Image: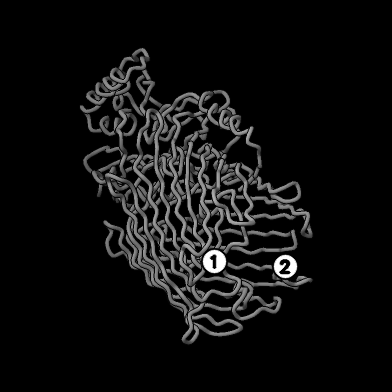
Amino acid sequence: MWLIKIKYGKGSVPLIFLAIFSLNGIAYSQEASVKKPLQHINPTGSITVRNIFVPEKIYGSLYNTPRAPVINHAGIRDNLYDSLRLRASKYLLTRKLYDYVIVSNKSNPLIQLSESSETNFLPYSGKRIRKIDIVRLNVFGSDINNPFDPRPNKLENLLNKTHLNTNEFIIKKNLLFSEGDSISPISLSENERILRELPFISDSRIVIIPVSEKDVDIYVITKDVYSLGASLNYSSIDKGSLSVFEKNVLGIGHEFRLDLPYDQELPDSPGIGLSYNINNLLKSFVDLNTFWHDGLGKKTYGFNINRKLVSSATKYAGGISVKQIITSEDLDTMQVAESLKINFQDYWLSRSFLLDRKSVTRFIIGLRYTNNNAYSHPDILPDSYYNLQQYKIFLASLSFSRQRYYKTNLIYGYGITEDIPYGLLVDMTAGKEINEFKERIYAGINLSSGHSVSPIGYFYSSAGISTFFNGNKTEQGVLMLRTSFFSNLNYLGTYRMRNFVNLDYTRGFGRYTDEYLFINKEHGFSGFSNDSIRGNQRLSLNIESVFFSPANFYGFRFAFFAYAGAGFLFGTNQYITEGHVVSSLGAGIRIRNDNLVFNTFQIRIGFFPNLPLNSNINYLCISGEHLLRPANFEPGPPSVMDYK
């Protein structure tokens, strides 16, 4: 991620707003909807999309419709859709294609999350898969919702030639089904999601075409992202980092990354970092990550091997992580830094038992062993600098998970399909730690749930508590309560709006002497920093309204937002009124191109009333933001609850 912070005078504010809103003026209007109407009907008797040939006898009644003059009138447009729907309704196959290709553009005042992602596949449950075809769309000038009518301009054609689309065998390697299998709606919906989660795929669709009463053909349609990118993290002329990466090397799904950090106050500047990732080794859904970083007074190298519970049918998940760290540490108090060397090893294994296929209800058992072998470190006390301690921890977990997905868009993304999990998770973890100072027992429980409430929107809530027991004393305990909400999609003219609310309460008890909570960017307070205020209890509330613009300027989409937030930071035995209060409000714009791997470009203008003393404020922040993803209901490896 790259970040540029700029301070400005009052006189520049009108110019900044003028520049922001002028972006909408130079763009041309295009609906950022889940599905777009087919505006140009091919008058010929067939359509060829890469290696797919669609004969006239299938599409004749749909595509031989005479081309009408383009008239910007909603009633005539809707009549055209009705006419096409009537023609298509004569045959099962053309009815199906109408549903996928042509969608009425009538605007409902409220879009709700109501259908599960497998709904469209349910009518074909149990039918035999006769054939599987892979359709790979170009990055630019194509539409996942209208794959039969790509319309790239000259620039887009040129850019497409500089990118290698994902190889067909890579797409096939990530499929959960084969020719001859019976249709499982849940497996197909899970497979769409698996393809979309690949770092080199922007979006995916799985389309079923019935060919007889018992057999169907399947088209797997994927659209790549432009996989070459770079990022800049700029703090000052003397400190920052530059990264260059390729997320789809030669179209085989491998990722290479080069990092060049620099800091004139640290030795060995600039540094260098290299990493190489391989997704889904040998169709095992095992991912491999290797890395090596050297510079700025620190050397780190190692590897990670991980396999998640990819689908509801996956029985085993696990991982191995090995990392070597060689650096020095002054603990912020020593005049001369001392050597710090850590060999970190982490191993985990989970077994999933599917209790109910329809609701994807599972019981999961997990085991984990972690060895933080800090064989060289400065002298520290038993209740400080936990990460520098030499310890071994053995953990076991029992989890009950129920999870399915809604399929929608315009939540965190800007038009691509988003998979929103709903369900519940009960996760209980216990274990024993042996470190260089003591032995102690760990126990924790976490509950989470998320569902759509049709008239309102989507609610997610979680609660957790954990602690170490050292005899009769609790250590490094944490209590966490969180809830979040986003509204259904509302229409404001040609704009679309969602509201977001996040409420978070965290309390630490028996924490080590150097462990505190802070208020910073991660809690919704971009542009604010103050290391002098800290506590063991934190309550934060953030509200944001996002307005998705219909503008589309060469694939760049725009979203305006306004926000307000309040954060309270206080001690373990203090009331909320006895601590520090930080409040903020402001507005901004986010710009994103889902065809590119770059982060979302964000310009944010904020105001902070009633600031605590010694606060550092940046009223204008220009940054690159990672695309957010909703929390899911997978337990993951057994772990100690975070305190941050």
Left or right: 195 as drawn, with respect to 232:
left
Which residue: 37% across, 28% down? 493
Residue 188 seen by the camera: no
Give the camera-side residue of 207 and 413.
Answer: 413
* Residue 265 x, y percent position in the rendering: 77, 57
* Residue 137 x, y percent position in the rendering: 47, 35
Left or right: 179 as drawn, with respect to 435:
left
* Residue 366 x, y percent position in the rendering: 42, 71
* Residue 488 x, y percent position in the rendering: 34, 42
In this rendering, the answer to whether 32 lies above or below 267 is: above
Which residue: 64% across, 72% down? 343
Q: Residues within 10 Å of mark 1 (few under 14, many from 20)?
A: many
Q: Residues within 10 Å of mark 2 (few under 14, many from 20)?
A: some
Mark 2 or 1, closer to the camera: 1
Give the camera-side residue of 70 and 114.
Answer: 114
The answer to which of marks 2 and 1 sits earlier in the sequence is: 2
Which residue: 57% across, 53% down? 611
Query: Which of the 4 image quadrants contains residue 290?
Result: bottom right
Left or right: 325 as drawn, with respect to 519:
right
Q: Amino acid at mark 2?
A: Thr
Badge number at residue 341: none
- Circle 1 sits in a helix, a strand or a loop, which is it? loop
Q: Real-space Cα distance between discs 2 and 1?
A: 29 Å
Badge number at residue 535: 1
In this rendering, the answer to whether 506 lies above or below 585 is: below
- Circle 2 sits in a helix, a strand or a loop, which is it? strand
Give the camera-side residue of 40 and 238.
Answer: 238
Which residue: 32% across, 30% down? 107
Tag 2 near tag 1, CB within 8 Å: no
Which color scheme does this rendered protein use? one colour
Badge number at residue 327: 2
